[in-house]
Amino acid sequence: SRPDPSAVSGVVLSHLVEFYEDRLNGRCEQVKRSLHIDDGCKLGDGLRRMLAAWPLPKRLSDLGVEVSALSEAANIAANDRAISNGPRNMDRVEIRQLLTLAH
């Protein structure tokens, strides 16, 4: 069975923020302030620290996602409109790398 898409989104969010961070046009500092993330901390790291205290899955493996499924997931994501309309284009290799980090 497939994991809940909302749970997957929660797991990959901080990694996706890191990937897009250079394209956020200075909005990272604003978001960090609103989330009370330390100034010296990157937004993605701060999100991971904040989410660590919540009773949520932290890794794709926590959701039962096998490493063998990551390439197929990257191929599917590469054709997803949410990915193709993001602030920076991601190719299958970059998506696979992001999924590996989140695994």
Image: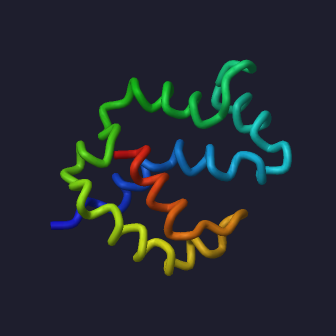
- Lateral position of residue 29 relative to residue 75, left or right: right
Q: Which residue: 42% across, 68% down?
A: 74
User: Can you give x and y, in whole percent of width and height, for residue 96 in the image?
Assistant: 44, 60
- Lateral position of residue 84 relative to residue 49, left or right: right
Q: Identify the residue at the far front of this view.
A: 93
Q: Tally the marks.
A: 0
Q: Identify the residue at the far left of this view.
A: 1
- Lateral position of residue 22 relative to residue 7, left or right: right
Q: Which residue: 55% across, 33% down?
A: 47
User: Can you give x and y, in whole percent of width and height, for residue 21 in the image?
Assistant: 71, 46
Where is the N terminus found, in terms of image quarters?
Answer: bottom left
User: Can you give x and y, in whole percent of width and height, for residue 12 in the image?
Assistant: 45, 49
In the rendered image, the vertical position of residue 71 relative to residue 12, given as above or below: below
Q: Nearer the viewer, residue 37 or 90?
A: 90
Quadrant of res 86: bottom right
- Lateral position of residue 15 relative to residue 26, left or right: left
Q: Which residue: 61% across, 75% down?
A: 84
Q: Which of 101 and 38 is in front in this view?
A: 101
Q: Which residue: 23% across, 43% down?
A: 62
Quadrant of res 6: bottom left
